[in-house]
Each structure stands twice: as structure tokens, then as C-alpha cells.
Amino acid sequence: MTVTQEVYPDAPALAAAIAERLTGRIALIQAEGRRPKVVLTGGTIAIDAYELIQSGLVDWTEVDFYWGDERFVPEGHADRNDQQARDAFLDRLGVPASSIHAMPAHGCDVSTAEAADQYAAALPSEPFDVTLLGVGPDGHVASLFPGFAQLHESERRAVEVFDSPKPPPVRISLTFPAINHSDAVWFIVAGEGKAEAVARALGNGTLEDTPARGAHGISETTWLLDESAASHL
Ligand SMILES: O=C1O[C@H](COP(=O)(O)O)[C@@H](O)[C@H](O)[C@H]1O
């Protein structure tokens, strides 16, 4: 497994690079005759990148989209990662509902834990092609936060999260067994506020203080950074 870093001058340049890289990877997979499976993240740089994605080389209607985590609020709520992705590119590119594998929402008729289990049961058995992961200033990825027990989950592929230090407090997250069942994991990180977390993730942090250390792809782990996020490396 290789771990690589790419550093771009600023957040707009990084967002453009993410959009181009994701489009290119999906085009390659489709050219091989396969249907790509992509795990989306929430977060600022992700939404900036999604807004730059254009149709063109890729048939976006033939891509399956999943999420690494979700805020457990009602369907259509502005805080939901799936709603933000729909608004940024999925609706614009005509991705059909059957390709959008959103996590359950608050208001579904099961508990948060059962909702997490339902999502896990619907995940594909083959590896994801690309998993995008934003990184919080505290080093969290998906909704796996420093010091939380979910960091050590080894059986369940999706879990409920309560008392998230970042609002909203109730979430569902993929676990490392699910995230790491990805051919490629791409961390996408912008801003000085993330620089310490990036340095710990790539340096001498621990899983407990920097959850990003627990994620890696089967054949590729890539850190896509802007200069500010890379400034403490
Ligand atoms: O709450 C979340 O935060 C992280 C990072 O977000 P950012 O705005 O600091 O970039 C994101 O990766 C995660 O998916 C999301 O639920």
C-alpha cells in the first residue's frame, strides 16, 4: 500500500484538483466496463469540489454513491451530508435515486442503531473504488471522533454516534472495517485549522488522538492538501 501526498496552492486549487481526480478515476473505471462505487464525505472542501464537477467524460448516472457518515437529522435537512451533495452536484448531473445510497434519516421508523445496521446490510460486498474523507481540526474522519469507542469497532460496518463534539450530536458513521474496504482512500483537507491534525495523522499521532490514522485504502492512500493544511508537515 502506498501513501502519497499532493499539495495545492490553496483551497480553490485543491477543490478543482479533487473534482478532476474523481472524474478521471470514474472515467477509467467506466472505461474498464465496471460500475464505480464512490463513498462521499461531507465538509467544506468536499462541497466546494462537488460544485466543480461537470458532466463530460463520465456517465454520472451509472455511478453508485454512498456516504462515510451522516448527521441523523430529518431527510432534506440542510445539515445532511447527502442533501449537501445533492444540491452541489448529484441533482444537477441527473444521478438517479437508485444510485444514491443515502444513510437513513431521523424520522425513519427505527432507532439510530438499527438504522446504522440497516445501512451496513445494504453496503456492497466488493470494495468501494474511492472513499473520500474530510478531516476535522480534531483529526476526525467520517463521524469517528478522538477518544470515541467507535474507533475500535471491528465487527459492525456502520455504527450510531451520540454526543458528537461537532454538531449535530447524533450521527451514523461507517467504521474502519468498512472505510478500509476501499481500493483508494483520498483524504481531502484544506486550511490552517487542519494543519496540526494532518501533521499528527502523517507523523506521530495516535489513533485515539487522530482518528484519520485508522483509514487507508487497499491499494492507494492519498492525501490531497492545500498549502495551509500541509504547513506543519
Ligand atoms: O461533520 C463533519 O465534518 C467533517 C469535516 O468537515 P469540515 O467542514 O471541517 O471540512 C466531514 O468530513 C464529515 O463528513 C462531516 O460529517
Image (cartoon, grey):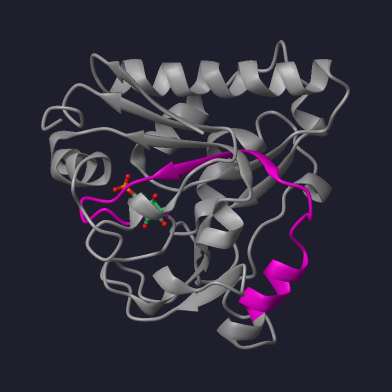
Above or below: residue 14 compared with residue 1 = above
Residue 155 in magenta stretch: no
Please indicate whether residue 70 sits to the left or right of residue 28 in the image. left
Above or below: residue 176 compared with residue 54 = below
Q: Position of residue 159 (x, y in %)?
A: 54, 74
Which residue corresponds to the image point at 26% horizontal and 53% vertical from the top-left? Answer: 139
Please report the bounds of the magenta region as a residue range: 115-141
In the rendered image, the residue lying farthest to the right is: 33
Q: Position of residue 67 (x, y in %)?
A: 59, 53
Above or below: residue 18 compared with residue 157 = above
Q: Nearer the viewer, residue 211 or 120?
A: 211
Please indicate whether residue 214 sits to the left or right of residue 204 in the image. right
The tally of labels here is 0
Q: Nearer the viewer, residue 182 or 60?
A: 182
Q: Position of residue 185 (x, y in %)?
A: 51, 38
Which residue corresponds to the image point at 74% horizontal and 28% vertical from the top-left? Answer: 60
Q: Quadrant of residue 45?
A: top left
Q: Position of residue 166 (x, y in %)?
A: 28, 65
Residue 124 in magenta stretch: yes
Which residue corresponds to the image point at 50% horizontal and 74% vertical from the top-left? Answer: 153
Please indicate whether residue 161 sits to the left or right of residue 88 in the image. left
Q: Nearer the viewer, residue 233 or 73?
A: 233
Which residue corresponds to the image point at 72% horizontal and 17% vertical from the top-left? Answer: 27
Q: Quadrant of residue 124?
A: bottom right
Q: Quadrant of the C terminus?
A: top left
